[in-house]
Amino acid sequence: MMVNRNVDDYVEQFNIQNRSEKPTRDRFFASWRRLAHNLKVLTTAIKSHQRGRSMSQQPYYAHGDKAPVVVQGTAVSYNPPVADAAGTTVPVNTYNHGPSEPLQIEEVQKQEAQPKRCNDVGWAILFYAHVVVMAFFAGKYGPQMNGGGERRLMESLKTVDEGDDRAHLGFVLQAFSMVVASVTSSVFPRDATESRALEENGEMAGISFLVAITFLIGSILSTFSLAFMMKYAAGLIKFGLIFNIVAMGLMALAGLLSGAVGMAMMGGFGMAFSAYYACKVWARIPFAASNLITASTSVKSNFGLSFFAYTSLFFLLAWSILWAVAFTSTISVTYGCDGDGQCESQPNGFVIFLFLVSYFWSHQVIKNVVHVTVAGTVGTWWFTPLEASSCCSRGVRDSFVRSITYSFGSICFGSLIVAIIEAAKEMLHLMREQDDGAFMCIAECCLGCLEAIVEYFNRWAFVYVGLYGFTFIEAGKNVIQLFKSRGWTTIITDNLIDNVLFMVSIGVGLLTGTISLLIAKLQGLDAEEGFLGVAFVIGLVVGFMLTSILMGVVGSAVNTVIVCYAEAPNEFQTNHPELSADMRQSWRQAWPTEFKY
């Protein structure tokens, strides 16, 4: 009995102690559960933040089923999928941007950034191989043009341009002929008489100074033209349309006064067409202006893009020199041609065609590397503006690296297609000089149309290459499908902005030419008759060229803005609400049927 009583007392004592400690243990475990829950929430928030900031992993902000969408710090409503008239479930996002105007946008299938891999590698290898071959030809046959060979080189360059009214290939060769002369003179020595004559000519120093100062002035003016264009975008578009009408009218008037009936008829027809076109597109001016302002804003926020654009000019210059030396020296030495274009044997037409493909291919590749870089940078600015809001932002650097590594094969592939068409068109033009028949004219016209179509396709395909890293074919199919799903096949054909960019380039070129003329006058370079005109032309060409390069960046940005607006308008409203509101209003006025935002 004593034992049982002791056991009972012990059990009773343990139960009392257990009841007193149970609340303490419950509080302890509850605290651990709350801590674990908070850590889980914090980890989820960090991962979500990293996904939003990393364009390379996930370029678009992912709207979760339960996560609220925040616009300028305020959570806005998210509508669940609804059924359309056919009973199909359609996801709809509603963003309340005003007290009485909700924005309803049907979602489209958004693309995702592709894995980091080199696309279309074979085309990149082929491009590098062809550059090596051209360098080999220049190194092998260039030295064989010693002792008057350089003079034959220059004369050959001029011979190519004879009779070429369009001055397409020949203009490029002639523009770089002076540079080729200086390069070949240092690589392939002259005789003593030519060297002394060049040293005694002091005008070269004055010309070099004029060209250098003109480049500086042109760069400054082209930079200021970007800010000017952003402020007066709509006015510039209107001025361009009116200017075309006035110019055609003056042409018709000049024809009437001079008795040139054909010129008068052409000017009258051009004036009537320009007036009709202005009336048709006048309502779309705010639409084009808003696109231009948005694109210019993205370029201004990442002005380091201009560095890569201007750098491409030097690559074009270096390539043109290498190609000119390789082409003229190879043809001259191999076929025994002299400065008058007389050859001991007839040059092979297929060889000339391959040389032309080589020239145009490299030209297209250099240009499209800049285009893809701009597309990637504007895409980063669109979705994650914190990474693309400075001159040398991470978005600019990463986009350029991707364009010359992972996407370089795709750029080479798309560029080769255009280069082949351009080379074939150039060959037909050269053949027309010997036999200007109707068949040749029609064939050249058809090739010109085909070239325009392929370049139009490439323009949009390379935007997707820059945004997501698709292969060239995949990018082209996906971007066309995007426009079809939005019903924007008509919107993307609008070319008002192209006219403005060209007009701004012409204006800066004229201003630079005038300044160059004044500098030549002050430097006393007008002693030789006609040199002031040469100085004006130098300034005109330099100013136009530099501004065209920068305007090309803006044009690429405009294309990227349209693609991003078709696919991700909600992200644009979140990150750039003021620009989004302006674009939405102007697009509704210009395209009330096609635009449904």
Image (spheres, grey):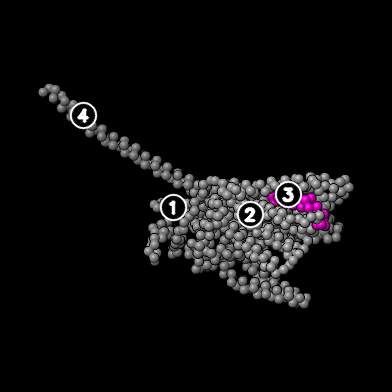
Can residue 318 be seen here? The reply is: no
Which residue is the site of mark 4?
A: 14
Mark closer to the chain start, 1 or 3 = 1
Q: Secondary structure at mark 1?
A: loop
Identity of the amino acid at label 4?
Phe
Which residue is the site of mark 3?
A: 322
Which residue is the site of mark 1?
A: 63
Instruction: Residue 141: give x, y in percent of width and height.
Output: 77, 47
User: Label 1 crowding class (10 Å Cα cut-off): few <14, some 14-19, many 20+?
Assistant: few
Identity of the amino acid at label 3?
Leu
Mark closer to the chain start, 3 or 4 = 4
Kindly indicate whether the residue at mark 2 contacts the one at mark 3 (C-beta within 8 angstroms).
Answer: no
Q: Secondary structure at mark 4?
A: helix
Residue sitting nearer the eye, 475 or 385: 475
Kindly indicate whether the residue at mark 4 contacts the one at mark 3 (C-beta within 8 angstroms).
Answer: no
Mark closer to the chain start, 4 or 2 = 4
Q: Residue shown at 82%/50% (left/top)?
A: 149
User: Label 2 crowding class (10 Å Cα cut-off): few <14, some 14-19, many 20+?
Assistant: many
On the rendered image, what quadrant is the N terminus found in? top left
